[in-house]
Amino acid sequence: MKQASINITSGGAKVCILGDDVFTVTSEGIKKFSLNSGSFETADLFTTDFYSDICAFSGKIYAISDIINGVQKLVVIDPKGGETSILREFNSEYGSVWFKNIIGDTLYVYDNGLIYAVDRDGSVQYTGYNDPAMICEEGVFTNTDLNNHTGFMFVPDDKKSGTVIEYHELEGRPVNASFINDSKVFIVVDQFRPAFVTLGDPSGKVTYLDIRTEEKEIKNSDIVSLSYLRVTEQLIISVAEYEPDTNMWNWDVFSNNLDSHGSVISGGRKYFHFENETLPLCWVSALDYHLFASGIDGVREEWYPLMDGMK
């Protein structure tokens, strides 16, 4: 079975793990603590430079610098000594450059819709991909209407055999891609309906997930995002619920188990609940046994490492 391929950045926690060390982006710079003996509260300041995104790749830290004089920089940082080298500059507005995915020996960087590939030697090349929803070894999934992020289709890599697959059932509907696991591409339709399509299936069939939990019923007014814990093979569901009385959002993050057919069965656990958030950005970073969520009010030092009871 292929290892899950997950979009790295979904608008939530900016965090990576190298060995036993956790590196997190905060408003003070990058902080570091040990998985075995520390927590965010005891984290040391690793660097005072400011970054908008971070990931672990090829045994080093890759980061996107905060915008300075209209320029953001893709940098690589040594996790021991902190030495930094610049790989590329991007003349894009703040928030439009982030890490998209890691597949094998390639890190993909999103720059205002353009996708660049970084190899382990630090070489950066434009891929020719424009605003894909999900990158995989076989090609890309993209919205058919890029302006409105509606519809869904698969476009094979031009170096490999394959055919374009259009999902006619999803035409005109908002679709976000979350991750690929065992040839199943997990998506969210209409912002609140988790589903999957099967990689390479020319029928374009869409299978909606049966999510059952005693505590949470997903409604069409909610906003849902998906992630995946590779080691425990659990689907992580984040649900933001709008409260009209307060004009704020509450959100929950919980897990469900996937059966052998890729459907969801009851089980798993609820990890945490946040109330009175200003935005419905309920994404988390799922790394091995660990879940990390950040505050969504713009204060990036509010981190919640959720490591107990995950194994």
Image (cartoon, rainbow, N blue to C red):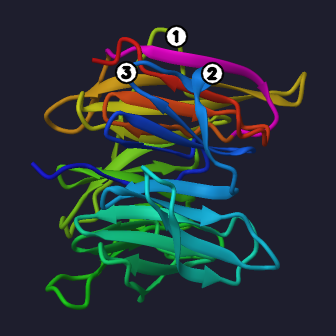
Residue at numbered disc 2: 41
> Viewer-proximal residue, 102 or 180?
102
Circle 2: element type: helix
The residue nearer to you, when weighing 27 against 92, is: 27
**Cα–Cα gap, marks 1 and 3:** 32 Å
Residue 233 versus residue 121: which sits nearer the camera?
Answer: 121
Q: Residue furthest front?
A: 81
For label 1, the residue is: 215
Marks 3 and 2, how far apart at CA: 14 Å
Instruction: Please state if 132 lies on the left or on the right of 293 as rendered.
Output: left
Mark found first going from the N terminus, 3 or 2: 3
Q: Position of residue 303 (x, y in %)?
A: 63, 30
Q: Label 1 to label 2, Cα distance in Å?
A: 30 Å
Q: Circle 3 is placed at which residue position?
A: 36
Whether residue 272 is in magenta: the answer is yes
Q: Quadrant of the C terminus?
A: top left
> Of discs 1 and 2, which sits in the foreground?
2
- Residue at figure coordinates x 61%, y 50% from the top left: 11
Residues drawn in magenta:
267-280
Please name the residue shown 88% across and 30% down the image: 247
Is residue 187 found inside the magenta-colored segment of the image?
no
Residue extending farthest top: 214
